[in-house]
Amino acid sequence: MISTLLSCSKEKDVIYDVNAVNVDDNSIDKSRSKTTSEFISIAYADLFGTTISQSDLLKLNTVYTAFGDKKLIEDRIIKNFLNNSNVNVPVAYDVDTSAFVNAAYKKFYNRSANAFELYYVKEQIRLNANLQPIVLYYGLMTSDEYRYY
């Protein structure tokens, strides 16, 4: 009988504290296309850190509207911006490549790179010594995702 009393005891109530976690939704549906003026203005602001002049925006908007192949003219606009000597593109990658890639995705896509994107881009940088940040910027800015909100 004494062994029965000692072996049976009331369980303690245990409370587990859970830390709040902020989760980014990387699968946001970007379904709204940027207008021509928005595309040009945002691309300019992303690369130069300032707003485009009204006259330059009007010229580029006119060329964009008049040209039949929209993807080709978007490509030319981005190349033109990237070849400008005043563009704000790093000359080399940071020591922390993950931070650089995530910063680029935040800048151009307003989201963090997912695990696959981060791995793939870091591998491309590691395997291709000639892959400069300007080429990565060009690839991100000419993608379909950059054209949408």
Image (cartoon, helix red, strand yellow):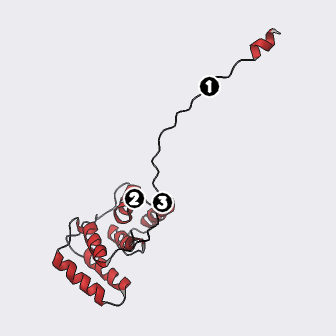
Q: Is residue 35 above or below residue 126?
A: below
Task: Provide residue 3's location: percent of width, then percent of height.
Answer: 80, 12
- Cα distance between the residues tagged 2 and 1: 43 Å
| Eye-nearest disc, 1 or 3 | 1
| Quarter of the figure with residue 77 | bottom left
- In this view of the protein, which residue sits in the foreground, 77 or 124? 77
Relative to 124, is 13 on the left or the right? Answer: right
Query: Which tag, 2 or 1, sits closer to the chain's start?
Result: 1
- Cα distance between the residues tagged 1 and 3: 39 Å
Residue behind mark 2: 102
- Cα distance between the residues tagged 3 and 2: 9 Å
**Judging from the image, what secondary structure is the residue with disc 1 in?**
loop
**Judging from the image, what secondary structure is the residue with disc 3 in?**
loop
| Quarter of the figure with residue 7 | top right
Disc 1: CA contacts within 10 A as few (<14), some (14-19) or many (>=20): few
Residue behind mark 1: 13
